[in-house]
Every structure is written in C-alpha cells, then in structure tokens.
Amino acid sequence: MHQLSFQTAIKYQPHRSEGLRDTLGRPLRDLRISVIDRCNFRCPYCMPEKEYSKHYTFLKNEEWLSFEEIVRVTRLFAQNGVKKIRITGGEPLLRPDLAELISSLKNIDGVEDVALTTNGLLLAKFAAALKKSGLNRLT
C-alpha cells in the first residue's frame, strides 16, 4: 500500500468540480450533524464525569443551530458531493420537531441517505413520525 507523506497530503488542493476531499484526496460523502448537546442518559462513554460534572453548562436553546441553518449547511455540502447525512446529539430525539428537519434534509438534491443515531429510549414515541419523514436508517 502506498502511503502519502503528511507534507504531500496537506498540499493537495481539490478542484471544485471534484467535490470535497480529505487530505489524502478521498471524496467526502458523509456529514455528521449534532443537533443538540443534551442527552437523557449520562453514560461515561459519551459524557465522562470529568468534563460533564454537575457544573457543566449546556448550550441555551437559542444557541443551537436553527433548522434553517442546518438545512443550508447540508445543501452546501450536498452541492459539493456529500450524499449521506447522520443526525446525532447528545440525544437527537430530545430536539423538538426532529422529523420535520429530517424531511427537509431528505428533500435536498444530492442527499441519498439520512440516518439517526439514538440511544432508543424515546424511539417508540417518535418511530411513526421518523418513518413518515423518510429516515433511512437508525443506529
């Protein structure tokens, strides 16, 4: 297997028509979007106590990216070759009207797949709306 040196990799400048590429020249096709920083669990893997102590301050709701901002950013990435979107958090099902956002993302030209990463606790409550929104996958 041929390895590129770090210096060679960082010199790579993609042409706009080729879409987004990483430092090794591989096309970027996936975009992960964290829609909320809160979670209904406090698992040590995602929220280690050292960083998320009782004094940790979460973002205020008005500091979250709006759905309009998320759709705009996704559209820009899709125009540059991104095809798969993964919605994460915290726990994304805590974000109000998430199915509406997913539906909007599914309607962006170039987006082929929208997935959601969840801990599953709230899934029964939202499963029908998520299916109707066009969500492709859950993990």
Image (cartoon, helix red, strand yellow):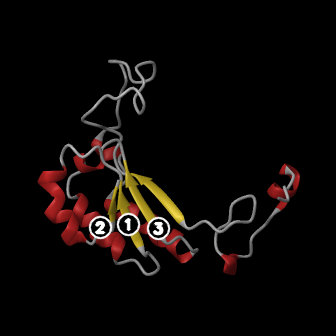
Neighbours of disc 3 within 10 Å: few (<14), some (14-19), many (20+)? some
Mark 2 and mark 3: Cα distance apart in space: 11 Å
Q: What residue is at 47 percent from the left and 56 percent from the top? A: 32
Q: Is residue 123 above or below residue 2?
A: above
Q: Position of residue 30 (x, y in %)?
A: 52, 63
Q: Position of residue 20 (x, y in %)?
A: 64, 68
Between residues 110 and 128, which one lies in front from this camera angle?
Answer: 128
From the viewer's perspective, is 126 left or right of 61?
Answer: left
The answer to whether marks 3 and 1 mark residues whose Cβ atoms lie closer than 8 Å is yes
Q: Amino acid at mark 3?
A: Lys
**Quadrant occupied by the N terminus:** bottom right
Find residue 135 and name its label. 2
Q: What residue is at 36 percent from the left and 27 percent from the top? A: 57
What residue would you read off at disc 1? 114
The answer to whether marks 2 and 3 mark residues whose Cβ atoms lie closer than 8 Å is no
Between residues 61 and 45, which one lies in front from this camera angle?
Answer: 45
Q: Is residue 89 above or below residue 133?
A: above
The answer to whether marks 1 and 2 mark residues whose Cβ atoms lie closer than 8 Å is yes
Q: Position of residue 48 (x, y in %)?
A: 42, 24
What residue would you read off at disc 3? 84
Residue extending furthest left? 125
Q: Position of residue 111 (x, y in %)?
A: 44, 75
Q: SS for tag 2?
A: loop
Find residue 19 and name its label. none
Neighbours of disc 2 within 10 Å: few (<14), some (14-19), many (20+)? some
Q: Amino acid at mark 1?
A: Val
